[in-house]
Image: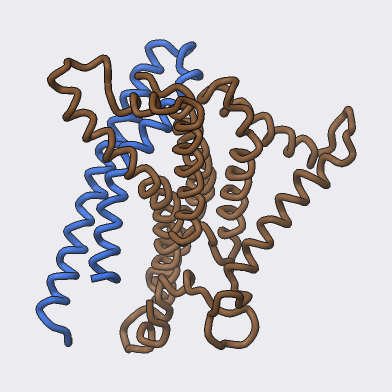
Amino acid sequence: MATEAHGAGEGGLAFHPMDQFLVKPLFGDGEVGMFTLTNATFWMALTILAIFALLVMGTSGRATIPSRMQSVAELAYDFVRKMVEDVAGKEALVFFPYIMTLFMFIVFANFLGLLPMAFTTTSHIAVTAVLAMMVFLTVTILGFVKNGPAFLSLFWVSSAPLALRPILAIIELISYFVRPVSHSIRLAGNMMAGHAVIKVFAGFSQVAMIAPLSILAVSAMYGLEVLVSFIQAYVFTILTCVYLKDALHPHH
Amino acid sequence: MEGDIAQLGQFIGAGLAGIGSGAAAIGVGHVAGNFLAGALRNPSAAAGQTATLFIGIAFAEALGIFSFLIALLLMFAV
């Protein structure tokens, strides 16, 4: 996505809606190398700091009557723990720290990305693909370690008629390998699309006649985005739990 | 206006891929609507099924996301 090519032309938007997703160096404007500090690095570090502040510092008091911060931390903990237990079963609780980390990272990255002038790290497929790939590898390796070759019975739908099973096996195999793709692009696509829509509406506000309408639309989209930010984090986590359940109990 | 016929095809194809997100919207609407219909018949059982609702929505949405992926590929990768 080029920078200078957009916006400079007459009649177009003052800024390109996709410019907010550009990865820029934090200091100066040189090349982005492997170890350059960029805005993506900055906002990811801020995400980690915010999670640390909430979960570690918030609960360090260990008060019987919790403060507001401690209540929120306990709420988040209980929410994810109950989700893992309900969807993936008791024996999946070994993976609770991993899933809690995923949930907190995604939900904080999404919410911090909603701040004005912020950079949404989860809107980049590079970020979400790594998260989804880690889940995929964890689940696949766990399935084979836990069940041995019996894990392959995940693809052999024993409740279907025998003639249909080979065809279903191919479909199941494809859908299994498509998991990391849909898992990562769902999150990145939702975040990117929502933020781009907000920017498009913001671009309309430079026309005085429709400016109030566009500000109204931006506010409405922003409200929707707050909802979407949470729901996408929830969906990412719950799908991780579903995949974990498949690995622990592969029998249909 | 500049560009060649290949670019024209890219843009038209990316636009056509947008139809897929409309189809995904139909799918998500079906899931949510049927959930609501069931939940209103038996509200006491509905609370336990919200996880299933979101999983169903996520799977219905996944195929809409592939159309978005195709649009992205046409715009930036081809």
x and y percentages locating residue B36 in the rendered image = 37, 23
Q: Answer yes or no: is residue A218 visible.
A: no
Classify A109 as above or below A7. above
Identify the residue at horizontal 36%, vertical 23% (top origin): B35
x and y percentages locating residue A183 in the rendered image = 41, 45
Classify A18 as above or below A68. below
Identify the residue at horizontal 59%, vertical 53% (top origin): A111
Q: Nearer the viewer, residue A219 or A95?
A: A95
Q: Nearer the viewer, residue A92 or A73?
A: A92
Classify A73 as above or below B53. below
Where does the C terminus of chain B fall, quadrant-wise? bottom left
In the picture, which chain is blue? B
A128 left or right, relative to B33: right
B10 left or right, relative to A12: left
Indicate the quadrant where residue A85 lies.
Answer: top right
x and y percentages locating residue A81 in the rendered image = 63, 29
Q: Nearer the viewer, residue A114 or A136?
A: A136
Check the image and name the residue furthest to the front: A149
Indicate the quadrant where residue B58 lies.
Answer: top left
| Colour chain A appears in | brown
Check the image and name the residue furthest to the left: B5
x and y percentages locating residue A182 in the rendered image = 36, 46
